[in-house]
Image (spheres, rainbow, N blue to C red):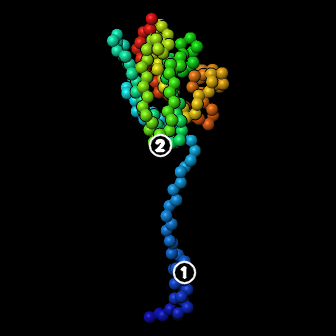
Amino acid sequence: MTRFPRQAWLAALSLWACACVVPVSPQFEDPGGNYSPFVASSVPTAGAELPASADSTYTIQVTLGDPNLDDVLWARWLIDYPPYDPAISRLALEDRLPPNGSVNREFIRFAPSCSDNQIVSGPASHRVTLSVADRSFLPADQAPPPDLQLDSVPTEGFVVRTTWIVDLTCP
């Protein structure tokens, strides 16, 4: 039987001790940065067509969210947009949702109508677009391309759009 000299054991023991790894707990950090707002839910669902009815008032209800808990959300209800057409595109309503400490914000509502929202006469179907931004919207004269005049934001901001089709013939 071969015996290891005492110095060999000590050398092996020191190598073994150096190979020992002590685990370090993971470090979690807020990734920072700006994230896009989003539509958490809507009734009716986004993209739905609201059929024509003589006695019905359409109400669209939307819950918005933003991972950046301190962001103010700006919402614009737009008619027949995008693209911007000065003859038919309209800003119908604007909402401002302050931070509430939660990703999801309070819901907002919109009821398209011929009189209140300046829907032009003529076409039987109209696009109702909800534009949501995490920055205030630029004035129309500062919007970069002419077809996005109603919902442009500064370059560091995000805009998301959701659209419904409303069958509503206005006189």
Badge 2 local density, few (<14 within 10 Å), some, or many (20+)? Answer: few
Tell me the amino acid under the disc marked 2.
Gly
**How far across and how far down the image is residue 21, in percent?**
51, 72
Q: Secondary structure at mark 1?
A: helix
C-alpha distance separating marks 1 and 2:
53 Å
Q: Nearer the viewer, residue 116 or 151?
A: 116
Residue matched to label 1: 15
What type is the residue that disc 1 sits on? Leu
| Relative to 53, residue 2 above or below | below
Please give the label number shown on residue 147.
none
Q: Is residue 107 above or below residue 90?
A: below
Where does residue 74 sit, x and y in percent of width and height? 53, 30
Q: From the viewer's perspective, is residue 11 above or below residue 118?
A: below
Q: Is residue 6 something that shows in the picture? A: yes
128 sits to left or right of 43: right
Please tell me how crowded label 1 is: few (under 14), some (14-19), or many (20+) other residues with Cα within 10 Å: few
For disc 2, the marked residue is: 101
Residue name at image x 58 percent, y 13 percent? 86
Q: How many marks?
A: 2
Q: Residue at 47% across / 18% down in the picture?
A: 127
Quadrant, the N terminus:
bottom left
Q: Looking at this view, is 4 or 122 the one in front?
A: 122
In the rendered structure, the answer to whether residue 46 lies left or right of residue 131 reads left
Return the x and y of residue 119 as percentages of the image width and height. Answer: 48, 13
